Image (cartoon, rainbow, N blue to C red):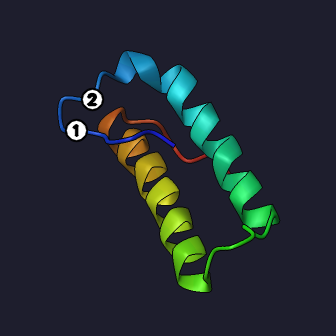
């Protein structure tokens, strides 16, 4: 997960950041995080989804079906 995304995010990084985030999201969705509450898991999933959404919107990358 990226630490933070700012309004000045460089879209040149999207080709590496987006696949990494998508892979992380897939892993989070498939595995139960030991020692984390349901709320913690949901917050982590939401944060990764928000980062993906931010990059796609900022860099005008369509969502693949």
The quarter holding residue 60 reads top left
Residue furthest bottom as drawn: 38
Q: Image check: 20 left or right of 3? A: right
Which residue appears at 42% of the width and 57% of the height? 50
Mark 1 surroundings within 10 Å by alpha-carbon count, few (fewer than 14), some (14 through 19), many (20 or more): few
User: In the depicted view, which residue is nearer to us: 57 or 26?
Assistant: 26
**Which residue, given by chain and number where applicable, does mark 2 sit on?**
9
Q: What count of labels does the image hold?
A: 2
Residue at 32 percent across and 42 percent down: it is 4
Assess whether mark 2 and mark 1 are in contact (beta carbons under 8 angstroms): yes
Give the image quarter of residue 26: bottom right
Farthest-out residue, left: 7
Q: Is residue 48 left or right of residue 28?
A: left
At 30% from the left edge and 38% from the top edge, which residue is drawn?
58
In the image, taking residue 20 as reference, residue 60 lies left or right, namely left
The residue lying toward the viewer, choosing from 44 and 25, is 44
Determine the secondary structure under disc 2: loop
Residue 34 spot, x, y in % from top left: 75, 70
Which residue does the numbered mark 1 point to in the structure image? 6
Nearer to the camera, 12 or 31: 31
Instruction: Using the image as rendered, state which of residue 11 and residue 34 is in the foreground.
Output: 34
Tell me how far mark 1 sits from mark 2, CA to CA.
5 Å
Image point (80%, 64%), residue name = 31
Residue 14, placed above or below residue 27: above
Residue 7: percent from left, percent from top? 18, 38
The circle drawn on residue 27 is: none
Where is residue 27? Give x, y as percent: 75, 53
């Amino acid at each position: 997960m990226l630490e933070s995304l700012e309004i000045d995010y460089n879209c040149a990084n999207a080709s590496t950041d987006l696949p990494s985030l998508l892979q992380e999201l897939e892993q989070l969705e498939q595995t139960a995080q030991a020692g984390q509450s349901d709320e913690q898991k949901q917050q982590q999933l939401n944060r990764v989804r928000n980062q993906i959404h931010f990059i796609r919107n900022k860099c005008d990358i369509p969502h693949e079906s």
